[in-house]
Amino acid sequence: MAWEPSAEELAALQQVHTLPLGARQHKVHVADFADLAAWQRQKSLRALLPRLLKGQEVRAVVDAFVAARRRGRAVLFALGAHVIKCGLSPLLIDMMRRGWLSGLVLNGAGVIHDLEIALIGATSEDVAQNLPAGRFGMVEETPRRLNEALRRYDAARQGMGQALAQELARGDYPYRAYSLLAAAAAYGVPVTVHVAIGTDTVHMHPSTDPGLLGAATYRDFQRLTLLLRGLHDGGCYWNIGSAVLLPEVFLKALTLCRNVGYRVERFVTVNLDMLQHYRPEHNVVRRPTQDGGAGYTLLGHHEILLPLLYTLLVEALGEEESESCRPSP
């Protein structure tokens, strides 16, 4: 027989205890809403960001960047190649022009796309179309120019980033105005390039010297380790669109920096990507800041999210230009 509540049990459910709405604690207040009136007065994008959830985190990320610049702390951007392919190089170049970036951290694919853009004003082949016939990645100029530059500018000593930055700044590149590497050379921004051999199309080319490639990217690992010193007490490290390689490099470089006696604490990390991945979340956002500082994750398409953040930074910093806090590499 099915159980039926008694009349007394049902009556007990009517003895509800209530409290006044105003006596309850609330997580959402109108003071935190998007301020359309302020936007209409000031034409400030920031005013349209609610002080809630990711809106508040975007505010915090911008505030941390602004504070780092004004206090002379390092601001380092680590970029996956897709950021370049989204057409965002002009924004990053302008940030270097303004003196806002203390260093760029790239992977091998990033320098490939940057070089091709500087050379012919285009990049990014159709992999599916070229793979069946074995033509994927088999262009001539990209690996030849890259490998020649590593030899010409003594990449084993200077590092891959500095060698290629000089190549893009000095060589015959009609579209160099769109090159991150050329801009880094022009504005004195250190660049490090971190390569996993076998992951980039240029590694298939017979002109590639694996010993030189390894020495060059190892030198950049050392340079990055020293650049991380500038993060201490208020710097910012943004990982933009690298799901595996650069988060792993960052964690090892940070460990080495701390192991040899440099304090790198109380800084802010930010991961910007279209999807949530394990390594950026743990190796960039959580673990490095677990004993101080803060980490943020902002998910969205690069071609939307980065212009949004750039606009907020320009609003906050205006035309402020100052020497970046750049530890000697």
Image (cartoon, rainbow, N blue to C red):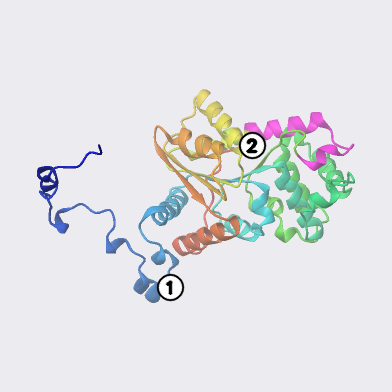
Is 159 placed above or below 145 here? above
Q: Quadrant of the C terminus?
A: top right
Q: Dot 2: what SS? A: helix
For this rendering, which residue is in front, 110 or 134? 134
Q: Earlier in the sequence, mark 2 or mark 1?
A: 1
Residue that label 2 marks: 245
Camera-side residue of 96 and 112: 112
Which residue type carries mark 1? Lys
220 in magenta: yes
Task: Examine the rendered structure and indicate whether residue 245 appears above or below residue 274.
Answer: above
Circle 1 SS class: loop
Residue topped by disc 1: 43
The image shows residue 139 at horizontal and vertical percentages of 87, 48
Cα–Cα span, label 2 and label 1: 40 Å
Q: Which residue is farthest front?
A: 1
Q: Tell me what residue is drawn at x 81 percent, y 31 percent.
A: 210
- Residue 211 x/y as whole percent: 80, 28
Question: Left or right: where does residue 225 sit relative to residue 261?
Answer: right
Q: Residues within 10 Å of mark 1 (few under 14, many from 20)?
A: few
Over which residues does the magenta segment extend? 200-222
Name the disc covering residue 293, or none.
none
Q: Residue at x 42, y 53 (%)?
A: 54
Q: Quadrant of the N terminus?
A: top left
- Tell me where residue 213 appears, x and y as whole percent: 77, 33
The main secondary structure of the magenta stretch is helix
